[in-house]
Amino acid sequence: MAGVDTSLSGLAGRYALALLDLADEDKSLDAVADDLRALRQMIGESEDLRRVLRSPMFSREQQATAVAAILEKAEMGESTRRFAQVLARNRRLFALPQIIEVYLAELARRRGEVTAHVTSAVELSAAQRQALTESLASSIGGKVQVDVKVDDSLIGGLIVKVGSRMIDNSLRSKLQRLQLAMKGTG
């Protein structure tokens, strides 16, 4: 995610490392990672949830109650729910999106995985995700974790970011390049 500090030295880094250690002790690294990915998606899709996480107008108790209900309804694991309660009690829920990013980045780093951020115009099927993962793994030469987001404004195609490299094969970008080329010929 652009602009997100994934260093381990800041507030988000300290909390993410603590969660990593707890999940490692519980042998639930993957379950917590899955919970955090689902939670990241929920935060991205819900303005109300973002407001609960960020607003100082809600008391600790109100934030804790709201987050507990949301995570229970989403059937999140015990480690994830307990961790969110600690964040609520410490008034640190505002940092949850950054904590999620740092946790996932550090887990991938420890496993020697590279994360590919893929934006597609439509939801990818399981077979398409698998084919994309295999293709990226063969071109990169290692383990690849694919993080897929949907942006229908792309019209068609994909944008793939791996580290500092980006491949933009979206129809939107192709049309923009064609439009610029046409302006230059006139």
Image: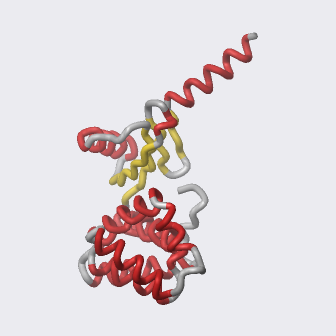
Picture coordinates of residue 32, whole percent (x, y): 31, 72
Picture coordinates of residue 64, whole percent (x, y): 43, 83
| Left or right side of 160 for 9 | right
Q: State the residue in front, 149 or 144.
A: 149
In which quadrant will I find the C terminus?
Answer: top right
Q: Residue furthest top?
A: 186
> Which residue appears at 31% of the width and 65% of the height?
34
| Left or right side of 56 for 53 | left
> Which residue appears at 31% of the width and 80% of the height?
79
Residue 77 location, quadrant: bottom left
Counting the numbered discs, the total is 0
> Which residue appears at 57% of the width and 55% of the height?
2
Q: State the residue in front, 150 or 6.
A: 150
Query: Colour scheme in the image?
Result: secondary structure
| Left or right side of 129 for 152 | right
> Which residue appears at 43% of the width and 70% of the height?
103
Q: State the residue in front, 163 or 80.
A: 80
Picture coordinates of residue 12, whole percent (x, y): 52, 76
Q: State the residue in front, 70 or 39.
A: 70
Picture coordinates of residue 35, whole percent (x, y): 32, 68
